[in-house]
Image (tube, grey):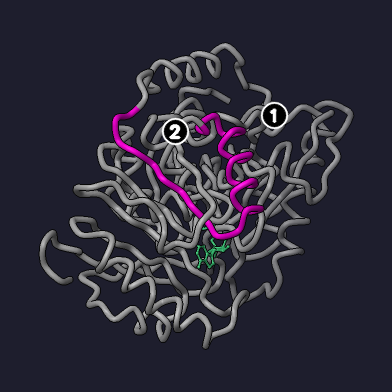
Amino acid sequence: MNTKERKNILVTCGPGLEGYLSAELQGLGFEIVSSHTGGIITRGSLIDCMKLNLHLRTAYNVLYLLKEFRCGSSEALYKQVSNLPWENIIAPQEYLCVLSRVDTFSINNSMYPSLKVKDAIVDRIYKKTGSRPNSGPDRNKVVVNLFWKNDRAWIYLNTSGVKLSDRNYRKMPHKAPLRESLAAGIIMATGYDGSQDIVLPMCGSGTLAIEAALIAMNKPAAGLRSNFGFKHVKVFDEQIWEEIRNDARKAVRKDKPQKRIIATDIDGQAIEAAKQNAKTAGVEHLVEFDVCDFADTYVPQGEGIVLMNPEYGLRLGEIQQLEKEYKRIGDFFKQNCAGYTGYIFTGNRKLSGKVGLRASARMIFFNGKIECRLLKYEMYQGKKA
Ligand SMILES: C[S@@+](CC[C@H](N)C(=O)[O-])C[C@H]1O[C@@H](n2cnc3c(N)ncnc32)[C@H](O)[C@@H]1O
């Protein structure tokens, strides 16, 4: 296996994040081969995969294509997978996890194809080396993904392993936290780049504030992670990885941004968790935390972004009470946020109707299975919104 060989790379993401992921890939100098629901295909080497794992904020997994083939049966699947030189990719003392997504007429569950792929890999390694890797569901060592659709199959090396949305800074999740990759996508959707003030009332465990601070500092998303799938393949080169990390360190902003990141919540425990998480992420000095009702949040004069993720009644809170809160959010935007662009991220369309302001844009995201909207409100200076 050659670390410089260029192949297709499938980068997966949550539905709704494809546009932001495309922009990130292009910003890092990668071409977009094609875009699909939940993933973007680009091209590059295994070394490129390492860079993508370190930098991408909205991605789940970076998958490096090993083989694409016609496949009409599980016997054909076994044979095709056995033909790959796995002994050059996975050491016999490693641990292997196979993940499958199958949509083909002859098979109706993905367990069996996963088993076939796992058998093909470990049998081949056993034949070539005399011992075989252990296997199971844990994603923290070597991970291989199978996609099988109709009569075509793709085998990928999952260079991320555990999803990249696990950044490792959220030691204290508190209530209903957003997934980090979704929070990063929401921040990107507001156009925030560190050159504006951003105010985040109802910040909960601080995910949006931390993702904003990482963007403002140009800190790589996975800078805190020590484990990735690519580290467990035979060709992994520690020195190349150190160089990639060093380049990323050099690109981090050294000065403190002039603009402010203000994050508040009515719940003192949420702010404690947010502070702790920001500390772990290395951005606690950039975020001004406060415990208060959202309507008492300090909003600096001038222009900026105010972004809120209120409860939306599916998991927390009572709808009637929340209707009043959404109305109060509209009042807060009108009365305290002149000159700002306001955003509400919510999974409840009825509640968003209570804000009492006309949204100038609605962007669709998914929080797990819940369809959510990021609603945008322009609060012009000196005029009623
Ligand atoms: C859906 S959670 C936000 C989760 C957050 N985005 C995260 O990733 O952790 C909503 C937050 O709003 C806070 N909250 C509810 N009512 C509030 C109020 N009147 N003023 C300020 N914060 C409030 C709750 O304490 C909770 O932390």
The quadrant of the rendered image in which ligand 1 is seen is bottom right
Q: Where is residue 147 in the image (x, y as percent from the top left)?
A: 57, 58
Mark before the other along the chain sequence, 2 or 1: 1
Label 1 residue SS: helix
Range drawn in magenta: 257-284
Q: Is residue 30 left or right of residue 206?
A: left
Residue 283 visible: yes
| Residue identified by numbered label 2 | 286
Q: What residue type is labelled 2?
A: Leu
Quadrant the C terminus occupies: bottom left
Q: Position of residue 349 (x, y in %)?
A: 40, 82
Q: Is residue 141 left or right of residue 194?
A: right
Q: Is the residue under label 1 in contact with that under label 2 (CB below 8 Å)?
A: no
Quadrant the N terminus occupies: top right
Q: Nearer the viewer, residue 108 or 209?
A: 209
Q: Distance between the residues labelled 2 and 1?
A: 35 Å
Q: Residue at x 60, y 65 (%)?
A: 72
Label 2 residue SS: loop
